Amino acid sequence: MRFAALFGRTLRQAPTEADNPATQLLWRAGMLRSLDTGEPALLPLGNAVLQHLITHLTHTLRRNGSQEIYLPTMASWLNAITTLARREIDSYRQLPLSVWSLRRRQRATVRQRSGLLDLPVVTSLSWAGLALDVAQAQTNLAATIEQLRTTLHKCGLMVVGDALKAERGATIIVDTPAGPLTTLDCPVCGVRTPIDLAPLAPLPEYSEPAPAMSLVETPNANTIAALATFLGISTSATAKALFFNARCAGEQRLIFAVVRGDREASLAKLAAVVGADELLPAEEAQIRACGAVPGYASPVGLRDVFVVADQTVTNGAPLVAGANRPGYHLRDVVYGRDWQATLVADIAQAVVGDPCPFCSTARAEGHGAAVGVVTTPQATTLLVQDAEGQNRPLVVTGIELDLEPLLHIAVEQNHDERGIVWPVAIAPVTVHLVTIGRSDAVITAAQTLATELQTAGWTVLIDDRDERAGVKFNDADLIGAPWRVVISEKLLATDQVEIRHRTASQPTIVNRSELKEALHDQSR
């Protein structure tokens, strides 16, 4: 690879759209650019890092016996694997079994930026374990996590490897100064969750007797706040009605969500439980068509609508809900007695201070970046025959690791005041070969040496530009290859080269015949 012909120039300064140090370094090193849409693009050196990371991670999965499949879809990973398993798995003799794929994955994003941390669509290394029971699945998952963790450490991604080893299935979150993700963090048990997906513990069952449902006139009380003020009650004693158009697999479906009045609905949670690609507010005509009245809507008496109830409104406590009649509400509405939901799920938005569902400690706000998901063992509806001939549900586990954000984190964790310091495992090239002088002898010697190094397994970038030595040295530090090797007319006269490790303060002079041995010695 010749620097003079490289698709990607180094920059003295990054553009203003590069709004954090790691992104700025990737821009300046000629590895990252943005399209007119704002989407980031990896140039050859940046793509080389991504490909090296992919090579190490996929080699780890191949080594542990996982089998590669091709899955050209952004659909739910574990759902897709379960669909395939229905045709291929029918006996315990086939288990445990693991498969993996490199695929494109859709994920939630705060905002589109020119960096790599919060891409809406990422390259995902997706792994799934299939097992006969939870114990077998957990053993397989734990072993795979530990193997990937070791590989990530080797690639200079210790913070990612450590985040991968979560005790509970969850979003994989890493600390990063540029983190776009707001999280809820438990200071005691360490569970971290994106705030819009943070789980809430279900309320205890309501045990007091509830009066019969009754109609009450509530003029101009078409908001939760106005209703609570008019009746002199807490907003937590009301039921909030929300209507959405859900786009699911290309089809539109009307969704009626019910949460307690003191809570907001989490659109991320709701979209996940109904399998929606997108949620949009429903139009007034749609709301009225199912029997509801905007501002006074209620789950009581609705028709032809998919009702999703948050777990906080299904514990039997009497609530005030709309009467589907302008100017009126219903008192003492009880779930199970007066109305039923199509689906009950945790769809309410958690907030700072909510108790952790695992240890009850108040949770605090944090910030980080999501780099994937770990799914702990869960039973499917697919039955598999065990050794005694009994049918048992197939158990699946999963890991989805988003790769582009890892480049950002690698730079964030491995740089100094001069530029990037790539770990050897994922460096775009291992040797940055700098020529000093434009004589034919220097150019020929550089090309010959590059061929020798490549034959021995090193990757080489020849800086053959007509630039001053200082400019070339600065760019070598900026790009961050592990070793810089210099050839000049003066060094050629003594059959020597200059070598410097990226983290060394001074270069050393070695005989050209000893170069490969010197590189090996410094790599230990």
Image: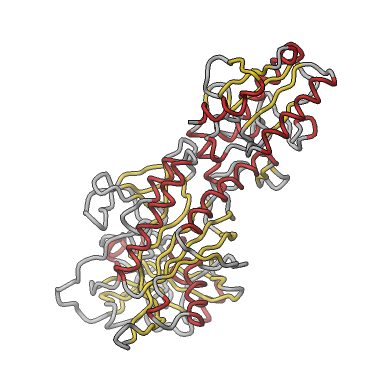
Residue, x 41% and y 69% (percent of image)? 241
From the top left corner, tell me how far across and down residue 142 is, in percent: 35, 58
Please name whichever residue, 373 or 501, is drawn nearer the observer in this view of the structure.
501
Please name whichever residue, 123 or 437, is drawn nearer the observer in this view of the structure.
437
From the top left corner, tell me how far across and down residue 232 is, in percent: 26, 61
Residue found farthest to the left: 208
Residue 518 vs 359, above or below: the answer is above
Residue, x 37% and y 80% (percent of image)? 300
Residue 354 vs 409, above or below: the answer is below
Quadrant (top left/top right/bottom left/bottom right) for the N terminus: top right
From the top left corner, tell me how far across and down residue 435 is, in percent: 74, 21
Residue found farthest to the front: 513
Name the colour scheme: secondary structure
Please name whichever residue, 496 or 423, is drawn nearer the observer in this view of the structure.
496
Quadrant of residue 318 within the rendered picture:
bottom left
Residue found farthest to the right: 440
Is residue 48 shown left or right of residue 137?
A: right
From the top left corner, tell me how far across and down residue 41 is, in percent: 68, 45
Residue 520 vs 276, above or below: the answer is above
Q: How many marks?
A: 0
Quadrant of residue 308 within the rendered picture:
bottom left
Residue 358 vs 422, above or below: the answer is below
Quadrant of residue 464 within the rendered picture:
top right
Residue, x 66% and y 47% (percent of image)? 39
